[in-house]
Image (cartoon, rainbow, N blue to C red):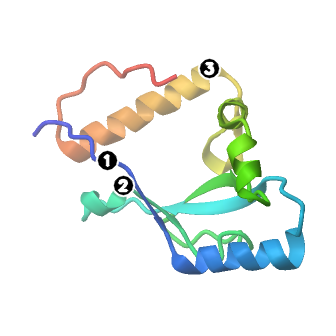
Amino acid sequence: MALKFAPFNSEIELPFYSALSQSKIDHDKLDDSARTVLGLYEPRVTDPDSSVRMRVLGNALTSDDVPPNHVRAEGKIKNVNTIEDFKNCDKTVILHTAAKQKRWGPGGMALTKESMVSFLQRKSHSALVERNDHQPQEPQDLA
C-alpha cells in the first residue's frame, strides 16, 4: 500500500464564534492584541480519514483542558475592531512572526536544537510508515 496524504481540514464549532464575540464585548473591548486559542487534534487509527481534522471547540478561548487521546494545538487569534483595521494589518508580518515562534515537543519542551527537530521528523515518518504498511524511505527535511 502506498503512502497517501489527505488534505487537512479544520472544524470550528459555532459556539466558538459566539464566545469570541462575547469576549470582545465584555472583556477585550477596544484591545485587539492577540489571544491564545486552543485547538484539538485527535488521531484516529481506525478512521484515518477523520484524523486530518483540527477542531476548535466553543470553549477554546477559556479552557486549557485537553481530553484523553487528543493532541493540543495552541495558537493565537487577533480580533480587530473594524474592517479597516483588518484590511490594514500586515498579514505577512503576522505570519512571519508566528513562524519564528519556538517549536514545542513532547511534554511542552521547547525544541531549540535542530537535531531534536530532525529526530522528531524521522520518528513521525517511521510512525506513518508503520501505520500505512509502506516500505521505508529516507525522511524528507520538513524545515
- Counting residues from the N terminus, which is met first, the one under dot 3 or under dot 1? 1
Tag 2: residue type? Answer: Val
Residue that carries the numbered disc 1 in the rendered image = 7
Label disc, if present, on residue 38 of the rendered structure: none
Label disc, if present, on residue 114 of the rendered structure: 3
Where residue 111 appears, as percent x and y from the top left, is 67, 32
- Counting residues from the N terminus, which is met first, the one under dot 3 or under dot 2? 2
Question: Which-is-in-front pick, marks 3 and 2?
Answer: 2
Q: Is residue 60 left or right of residue 134?
A: right
Q: Residues within 10 Å of mark 3 (few under 14, many from 20)?
A: few
Q: Residues within 10 Å of mark 2 (few under 14, many from 20)?
A: some
The residue lying at 56 percent from left, 73 percent from top is 57
Tag 1: residue type? Answer: Pro
Of the 4 image quadrants, the one containing the N terminus is top left
Residue that carries the numbered disc 2 in the rendered image = 52
Q: Is residue 7 left or right of residue 69?
A: left
Circle 1/circle 2 CB separation < 8 Å: yes
Question: Which-is-in-front pick, marks 3 and 1?
Answer: 1
Residues at marks 1 and 2, CA–CA distance in whole angstroms? 7 Å
Which residue is most to the left? Answer: 1
Where residue 58 appears, as percent x and y from the top left, is 60, 77
Q: Which of the two residues, 17 or 59, is positioned nearer the viewer here?
A: 17
The residue lying at 34 percent from left, 41 percent from top is 127
Where residue 86 appears, as percent x and y from the top left, is 70, 50
Tag 3: residue type? Answer: Glu
- Counting residues from the N terminus, which is met first, the one under dot 1 or under dot 2? 1
